[in-house]
Image (spheres, helix red, strand yellow):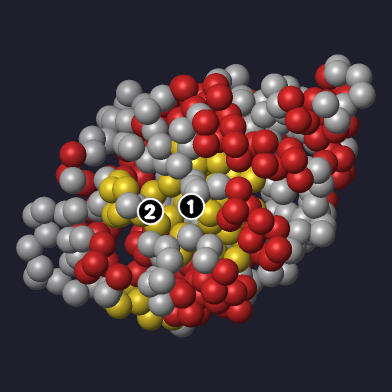
Amino acid sequence: KSNDYIVQSIEESLLPVGYEEIEKAARDILSPQAFSYISSGAGAEETARKNKDAFQKYSIVPKLLNDVSEVDTSISLFERNYPTPFILAPVGVLKLADDQGDLAVTRAASKYNIPFIQSTVSSFSIEEVGQSSGAPKWFQLYWTSLEDISFSFVKRAEKAGYEAIVVTIDTVTLGFREKDLSYGYSPLADGYGQGNFESDDVFLSTVEEVNNSAIVDGIIKNINYPALNWSHISKLKEKTSLPILLKGVLHPEDAQRAVNLGVDGLIVSNHGGRQLDGVISSIDALSEIAKVVNGKIPVLFDSGIRRGSDALKALALGADAVLIGRPYVYSLAINGEKGVSQFLANFLQDFSSSMMLSGVKNMKQLQQLKIICD
Ligand code: FNR
């Protein structure tokens, strides 16, 4: 029940409340290269800007006098109940923000039973994160150019108790991120993203000499796979019984094809504007995809969620759950595990207040909330 979320008093908290202030505080703490890696988008950052601006085109039309004294934020996904409609997006190289990286994030997530999606290029291994807390864990797969490595990750995730596989389809090559290129900066080259590779027998058997720079070279060489196509998704379906979600869907026909193929869920996302610059904002892509999918499989959403009212809009426009990205990464940088907990407490409070003020008391009513677009 949403009313149980307790906001830390602002005096006690080292974390600012508003997103813009959180981002500013993270900028002050992180090196310019690290902050830029997290905050920037690809190209001229047109899509990163659109993600933000597009939310403002949608307005909530509250329907009131509905006795909202009991608000239920719970959802059910893949036959499991969750107390909130939120999931933490896969973000690689989290040690860039805090030494405890993924471990700190999953511990914070466990307090709210929020699933954490671990990145392929995470700072800690599947096994370490698997054991770190009771939060539900999903694994995000970047299809590697050596297929056996991809399948090895999936097997390891199954063994470590992960509950879903998220295949990111928008990263067949890395986006042209001008700021990182200007800095000549890559957190992978700095060794922040090799948690899963250091202990993977299949991967290590491909590296001639096992030392740090060979591992880093191996990751950079194998991580993007431009030949990725629908046949790989069919093959993955044969390899695992876990639910498979595709992350990065923006075209309704891709959504339809995924449904036809028997994919278990979709994530409408443009990777926070970090891949192809100039693509449609994620929120503008959502309704048409939700319409095509028509409830057959869950449609999740990310790119631009900053506060409770953003989440409210995405859920009303057809998302079944919403992924949070940059806000938790900045909170981690500011105050580690505690920062992420504080952020989540505030975010959940903001979300449940937003539901109450819109006159909705559960997810079913939220799906019927009226949203108009300018
Ligand atoms: C990401 N994202 C990402 N996605 C993914 O599938 N695998 C990954 O390893 C990463 N790594 C990553 C690093 C950083 C620093 C950021 C900011 C993002 C994308 C992420 O899952 C999500 O799609 C975006 O963060 C959503 O955009 P906003 O809401 O954070 O702006």
Whether residue 273 is visible, yes or no, is no
In this rendering, the answer to whether 261 lies above or below 308 is below
Disc tally is: 2
Residue 321 circle label: none
Residue 335 coordinates in the image, percent (x, y): 48, 25
Pointer 2 residue: 78
- SS for dot 1: loop
What residue is drawn where x is 42% and y is 63%?
A: 298
Tell me if 82 is positioned left or right of 356 in this view.
right
For marks 1 and 2, the one nearer the N-term is 2
Q: Residue at x 54, y 74 (%)?
A: 260
Q: Is residue 337 left or right of residue 73?
A: right
Residue 250 position in % (x across, y down)? 61, 70
Above/below status of 310 relative to 144: below
Q: Amino acid at mark 2?
A: Phe
Work out which residue is located at the far top of the displayed protein and give it: 211
Amino acid beneath label 1:
Pro
Left or right of 310? Residue 359 is left
Most foreground residue, 115 or 203: 203
**Residue 374 position in % (x across, y down):** 46, 82
Question: Does residue 276 sit above or below 188 in this rendering?
Answer: below
Q: Residue at x 70, y 42 (%)?
A: 150
Q: Alpha-carbon neighbours of circle 2 within 10 Å: few (<14), some, or many (≥20)?
A: few
| Residue 234 percent across, percent down from the top left | 64, 61
Whole-number angstrom distance, CA of label 1 to CA of label 2: 7 Å
Asked whether residue 139 appears in the rendered view, the answer is: yes
Image-based side of 41 in relation to 81, left or right: right
Disc 1 marks which residue? Answer: 243
Regarding mark 2 in the picture, which secondary structure is present there? Answer: loop
